[in-house]
Image (cartoon, grey):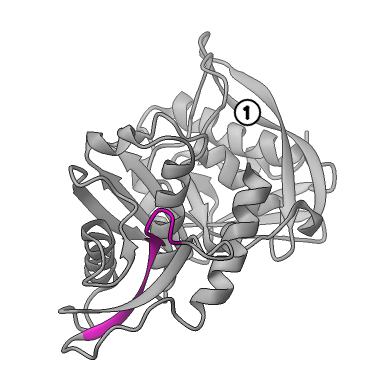
């Protein structure tokens, strides 16, 4: 299903570059919003189409304000034509926040009514629409503050949606992600990560760690809303640039802080080419993670 859906999306996005329907000139600012074609009217895999919508939000307005306006327009549906919103009418937007270059979108409980392909298309339409705004690289989607019941991931990147087939996979790598066990200890969960062109293994690993475990017997350690601005590996050293604002989300308990830091470090050290770890906050190197010296995890054990 994933390969077929991505292929259809690739076709749709190629068509969307020219627009799937003309909209008359209006007052306001034009924003590219991705809708679904009406059922039965898609041609040649044209499932998702972009349309310029004129919204009463100035392009100089704060990014969060513009993103919320785009999300609400997508939910309400297009102003005309054959396109439609991927969202049920009873879904409402609880909040939309921008942290770093991630948009955190929380919908009402009714969003959990979506499942299967309908849920996937709703996620994709939202991600493509918000990623069209400069400054948004990823979209985190929750319902009533919790991970959506039917979807295996909560964070989406535009680049993930533009892949056409599995032939684009550069490599598959087995890693171990560390989460909290019922006994309060770190426990490893084996994952096979796919790395596509334009991605790095370290980015995919940290994204998977932020999304949380697949096993119901394990718990996520990193606080919700924690933002990683950038990741790079140079000479075997992994540099993780965190949002300074996110550090305020760390629990006050020293043992809990150490578990979070060790979860991050041990997960990255499951990649054999990573030998060291450096943490930064908005570009400035950290010596402490909360109250825990970063030196404790600076080298592979």
Q: Nearer the viewer, residue 33 or 182?
A: 33
Q: Is residue 234 above or below residue 172?
A: below
Span highlighted in magenta in the image? 29-41
Q: In this view, does 23 lie to the left or right of 160?
A: left
Residue 185 horizontal side relative to residue 40, left or right:
right
Is any atom of residue 144 visible in this view?
Answer: no
Residue closest to the far top: 183
Seen as rendered, the residue at the extreme front is 40
Residue 152 in the image, given as x and y percentages of width and height: 52, 34
When the figure is inspected, residue 159 is found, relative to residue 81, above or below; the finding is: above
Secondary structure at badge 1 equals strand
Count neighbours of disc 1 (C-alpha within 10 A) and say few if under 14, some if 14 to 19, many if 20 or more.
many
Name which residue lies at 45% across and 27% down.
256
Quarter that holds the N terminus: top right
Q: Nearer the viewer, residue 207 or 280?
A: 207
Residue at image coords 38%, 46%:
141
Could you say which quadrant of the image residue 99 lies in?
Answer: bottom left
> Residue 197: which quarter of the image?
bottom right
Residue 220 horizontal/vertical position (percent): 49, 28
Taking depth in this image into account, of 250 and 193 the one nearest to the observer is 193
| Residue 261: image location, x then y, percent | 56, 37
Up-down relation of residue 218 to residue 127 (above or below)? above
Residue that numbered label 1 is attached to: 178
Q: In this view, does 114 lie above or below 138?
A: above
């Amino acid at each position: 299903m994933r390969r077929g859906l991505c292929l259809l999306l690739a076709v749709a996005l190629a068509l969307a570059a020219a627009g799937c329907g003309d909209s008359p000139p209006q007052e306001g600012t034009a924003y590219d919003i991705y809708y679904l074609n009406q059922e039965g009217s898609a041609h040649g895999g044209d499932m998702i189409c972009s349309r310029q919508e004129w919204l009463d939000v100035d392009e100089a307005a704060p990014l969060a304000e513009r993103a919320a306006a785009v999300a609400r327009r997508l939910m309400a549906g297009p102003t005309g034509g054959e396109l439609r919103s991927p969202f049920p009418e009873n879904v409402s937007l609880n909040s939309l926040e921008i942290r770093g270059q991630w948009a955190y979108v929380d919908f009402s409980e009714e969003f959990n009514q979506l499942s299967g392909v309908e849920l996937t298309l709703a996620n994709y339409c939202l991600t493509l629409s918000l990623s069209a705004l400069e400054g948004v690289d990823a979209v985190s989607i929750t319902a009533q503050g919790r991970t959506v019941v039917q979807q295996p991931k909560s964070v989406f990147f535009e680049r993930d949606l533009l892949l056409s087939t599995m032939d684009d996979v550069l490599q598959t790598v087995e890693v171990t992600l560390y989460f909290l066990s019922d006994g309060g200890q770190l426990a490893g969960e084996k994952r096979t990560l796919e790395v596509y062109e334009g991605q790095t293994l370290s980015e995919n690993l940290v994204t998977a760690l932020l999304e949380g475990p697949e096993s119901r017997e394990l718990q996520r350690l990193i606080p919700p809303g924690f933002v990683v601005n950038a990741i790079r590996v140079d000479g075997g050293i992994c540099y993780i640039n965190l949002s300074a604002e996110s550090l305020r989300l760390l629990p006050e308990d020293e043992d809990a802080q150490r578990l979070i830091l060790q979860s991050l470090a041990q997960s990255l050290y499951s990649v054999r080419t990573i030998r060291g770890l450096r943490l930064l906050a908005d570009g400035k190197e950290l010596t402490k993670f909360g109250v825990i010296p970063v030196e404790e995890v600076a080298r592979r054990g």
